[in-house]
Image (cartoon, rainbow, N blue to C red):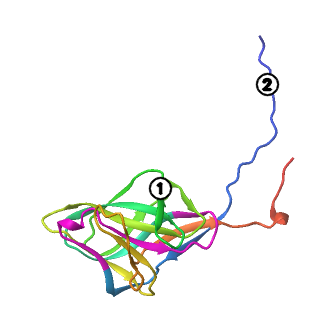
Amino acid sequence: LTPTPYGLGEVILKSTPREKKTIGHTSFTAGSMGYWEGEQAIGGEIASVISIQQKQTKLHGFSFNILQNKSDSIKVRVKVYSYLGGEPLDDLASEEILHTIHNKKGMEYISLEDYDIKVNEDVLISIQLVEAYGPQIYFALSASAYGGTSFIRQKMHPYWQIQKTVCVGFKVQSSFPISIPEDRITKTD
């Protein structure tokens, strides 16, 4: 057997260019808030509707402003629900997203980069209190300065409470594909 080399045609792999955009609630107020307090808060969820304007929007992460955290730290579970204007539907994350918050005050960022969440329609992002460390449980975060819709769910409760006047302030870092005119695409033989 004699090896014979073969030449293959050129193959170029390109990713679609994406435009980055901050969506959700970009301005916060200390006048209204969402919070957890006491042992009964464990298992509770706080959620905010995020409006999606572009198809194939990728969620890179989100941030929120902590007004006060009296626990040593807290562990939260992040959920990204499909949302068609009624109640939250399916969790879109392919695996569990856990994050520990140590900050007592100020901005907190939770990365979603490893989960490759791409959406075409509005979503609901929630944080669920999984564990609190230390002798006291109290965690408060800012609401959006411009309103919106939030949802609250108590531990082991199947139904959501809708808050139409106070919206939890989640600011989401996202990107979406940029369409390129055909005349700007280079083809090779």
Residue 126, percent from left and from top: 40, 67
Residue hosting label 1 = 93
Residue 131, percent from left and from top: 24, 59
Task: Describe residue 150's horizontal placement relative to residue 176 as left or right.
Answer: left
Q: Residues within 10 Å of mark 2 (few under 14, many from 20)?
A: few
Q: Could you tell me which residue is drawn at 40 percent across and 52 percent down?
A: 96
Task: Describe residue 31's horizontal placement relative to residue 132 as left or right.
Answer: right
Q: Which residues are magenta?
A: 34-59
Q: Could you tell me which residue is drawn at 57 percent across and 60 percent down?
A: 118
Q: Are marks 2 and 1 in contact (CB under 8 Å)?
A: no
Q: Nearer the viewer, residue 184 or 140?
A: 140
On whether residue 57 falls in the magenta region, the answer is yes
Numbered badge on residue 26: none
Extreme left residue here?
A: 135
The quadrant of the rendering that contains the N terminus is top right
Residue hosting label 2 = 5
Q: Nearer the viewer, residue 46 or 173?
A: 46
Task: Describe residue 116's horizontal placement relative to residue 71 as left or right.
Answer: right
- Label 1 sits on a secondary structure element that is loop
Q: Residues within 10 Å of mark 1 (few under 14, many from 20)?
A: some
Query: Above or below — where is 157 with respect to 15?
Result: below
Amino acid under disc 1: Ala
Query: Above or below — where is 96 with respect to 151?
Result: above
On whether residue 77 falls in the magenta region, the answer is no
Q: Could you tell me which residue is drawn at 73 percent across and 67 percent down?
A: 179
Quarter residue 10 falls in = top right
Q: Could you tell me which residue is drawn at 49 percent across and 54 percent down?
A: 115
Task: Describe residue 42's horizontal placement relative to residue 48 as left or right.
Answer: left
Amino acid under disc 2: Pro
